[in-house]
Amino acid sequence: MSLLTLDTANAKTNLHQHPFQLDHALSDHQLFTLERLVDLASKMPRDKIEYNSGKVDINQDPDTTPQVNLEPAQVIREIETCGAWLVIKNVESEPAYRALLAEFIGELSDASGLEAEMFEDLQGFIFISSAGSTTPFHIDAEENILVQISGDKKVHVFENEDRSLVSEGEMEISPDGHRNMHYQPSHEERAAVFNLKEGDAVHIPYMQPHWVGTGERYCISMAMTWKTPEVRRLNKIRFMNGTLRRYGWVQNPPGHSALADGAKVLMHDMVRAVLDPIRRSEKARRWLRGLIYGRKANYYYEAGHKA
């Protein structure tokens, strides 16, 4: 049985370019019961779980985000009543979720007519949200199919080719930079709005700003994400730009200089070759983030405890 249904012509035209809606067959899948998600959260390293109150503004200031005084597993168990938003990151580390993600993206590759090489670095993120929750205005550094498993969501995706909503500087990647972006109600003039119910999904292209609101019951969604070779290159440049900016060396955006871009990609790969073996443990990842980027890079450890 196919996991997704989409118009092939639409996918070939719009994938990686524009948002569009499609259908899926995962709403009754056993991997997305609350009991299974409690078990998953219990297995994941703490830096792979982020949560806070779902009662936040579209334009939420990260420094004043209200928290929920519960542990992750308890948040999931009480999601119908606790008023929370929670994400389990990198679920591809668990074999069952990795297999599902690979199958889903494989079908997407076949349907779009694009080569498998265009779908690299597969990652999965599962969102569990109480009724009436908001995910503030933000951008994500990957291509994404957001799959609605249970409940209803309204997803607002924004065209930003002229960078008037989110600037190139704000698109830089740094662990100490929160994903939330500045939002104004006038932005809605550019919004493509998708009303997702169980069995619906939407493609959110790389770095396109969006915000999300849940309906009258709790929601479970999974972001099936991947990166094209170009996205991986851009992320390396934007990561180096974000890191260098932190130390006072403001950089030009990708595409300004092929020589500078190439040097940043090389520098990124050299540093990661040294650090990746060290970053295998959660303790080491936390220490390195704090050492290089400061306390804010580990902000999600504070979630779950009210100030």
Image (cartoon, grey):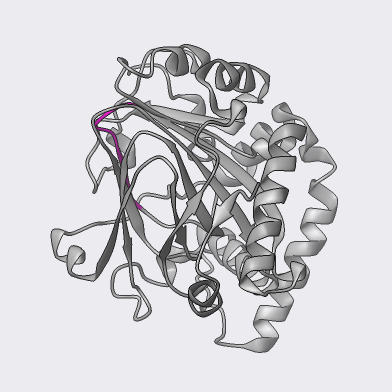
Which stretch did the figure color magenta? 130-137
* Residue 122 image position (x, y, % from top left): 69, 52
Residue drawn where x is 68% and y is 74% of the image = 114
Q: Residue furthest front?
A: 1
* Residue 49 image position (x, y, % from top left): 55, 29
Is 231 situated above or below 78? Answer: below
Residue drawn where x is 50% and y is 80% of the image = 13
| Residue toward you, 299 or 251 | 299
Report the label total.
Answer: 0
Is 56 situated above or below 161? Answer: above
* Residue 57 image position (x, y, % from top left): 22, 41
Q: Any magenta on residue 171?
A: no
Quadrant holding the C terminus: top left
Q: Relative to 224, is 71 on the left or the right?
A: left
Residue 94 shows in this picture: no
Residue 62 shows in this picture: yes
* Residue 272 image position (x, y, % from top left): 78, 55
| Residue toward you, 194 or 297 | 194
Q: Any magenta on residue 132?
A: yes
Quadrant of res 305: top left
Residue drawn where x is 48% and y is 50% of the image = 146
